[in-house]
Image: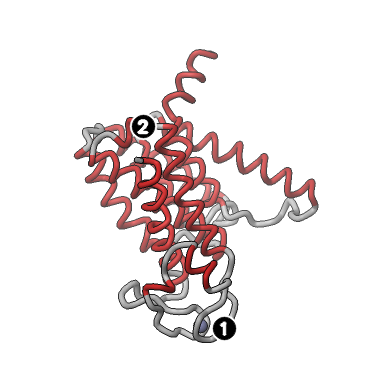
Amino acid sequence: MTGIFLFIGGLLLGSFINMIVWRIPNGITLKGRSLCVHCLHTLAWTDLIPVVSFLLLRFKCRYCLRKISWRYPVLELATAAALVFAWIARPDYFAAALDVSFVVLATGVLVALFVIDHEYQIVPDVITLPAIAVFMVLQITRGVLVSSLLFAALLAGGFFAAQYVFSKGRWIGDGDIRLGVLMGILLGWPHILAALIIAYVLGAGIGLVLIGLGTAKLSSKTPFGTYLAVSTFIALLYGSQLIDWYIRRI
Ligand SMILES: [Zn+2]
């Protein structure tokens, strides 16, 4: 039952993220009714049922008949899948209301940052800055040590800031510095280390595969925020296990 509830909630969250990831990079306010991305016609609620509307409308806008990208329903399904996956991996996150709001919000923010960085190569401050403030309050209320949060935020933010200065912005963007701070607040110490290591392993692995397939060159700019969003999600769910495993090995 919880799984079905989370899946439906995830579809709705995904539908909201669809709206954000289109409006923020295009400078459209988040207020107001949903619009068609082509003709800007206001959409009825029947056009907005996650996944179902896309199928019923056969991936076309009801008003201008232009095609709606398959990415919309895929993002809704992916968000729903991420929430159900989080519940299976960490049922303890879904026991108390405060933890549920933390993990659901974190999943939503990470999915949104992943998609925006992937599509537009930006990590928008309008998401990271409020998220840093909101998660700081949530984490302290959940009883996470402030020193652990601040140290992790300083470590990841400082690490990215150093790279940004050293490479004059060629290796990573300045938005990644704020994303590093957000990662620290979401994960605390020492889980932040797991996230950073996963991001670089993932980045190197996928980079090599893409170069192997001939779809990327060594000089290709990769949206690093996408790797950071994925690694943060993995560390949220498996950070403790990964760190235990690492400590047992040394
Ligand atoms: Zn339209």
Residue 250, compared with residue 21, is above or below; it is above
What crowding class fits label 2: few (fewer than 14 Cα within 10 Å), some (14-19), or many (20 or more)? few
Q: Nearer the viewer, residue 40 or 130?
A: 40
Inspect this view and state whether residue 181 appears. Answer: no
Farthest left residue in view: 141
Residue at the spot 58% in from the left edge and 81% down from the top edge:
66
Q: Nearer the viewer, residue 230 or 165?
A: 230
Mark 1 belongs to which amino acid? Leu
Total numbered badges shown on the rendered structure: 2
User: In the picture, residue 208 is in which quadrant?
Assistant: top right
Q: Nearer the viewer, residue 45 or 237?
A: 45
Gap in angstroms between the C-alphas marked 2 and 1: 43 Å
What crowding class fits label 1: few (fewer than 14 Cα within 10 Å), some (14-19), or many (20 or more)? few
Tell whether 97 sits left or right of 112.
left
Q: Are marks 2 and 1 in contact (CB under 8 Å)?
A: no
Residue indicated by mark 2 = 91
Residue at the spot 59% in from the left edge and 56% down from the top edge:
170
Residue indicated by mark 1 = 65
Q: Position of residue 63 (x, y in %)?
A: 50, 85
Q: Secondary structure at mark 1?
A: loop
Q: Secondary structure at mark 2?
A: helix
Closer to the chain start, of discs 2 and 1, is 1
Q: Position of residue 94 (x, y in %)?
A: 31, 37
Residue at the spot 48% in from the left edge and 32% down from the top edge:
194
Q: Which mark is residue 183?
A: none
Q: Position of residue 45 (x, y in %)?
A: 37, 73
Q: Position of residue 104 (x, y in %)?
A: 35, 47
Mark 2 belongs to which amino acid? Pro
Residue at the spot 47% in from the left edge and 70% down from the top edge:
22
Residue 65, compared with residue 166, is above or below; it is below
Q: Is mark 1 within 8 Å of ligand 1?
A: yes
Which quarter shows the N terminus?
Answer: top left
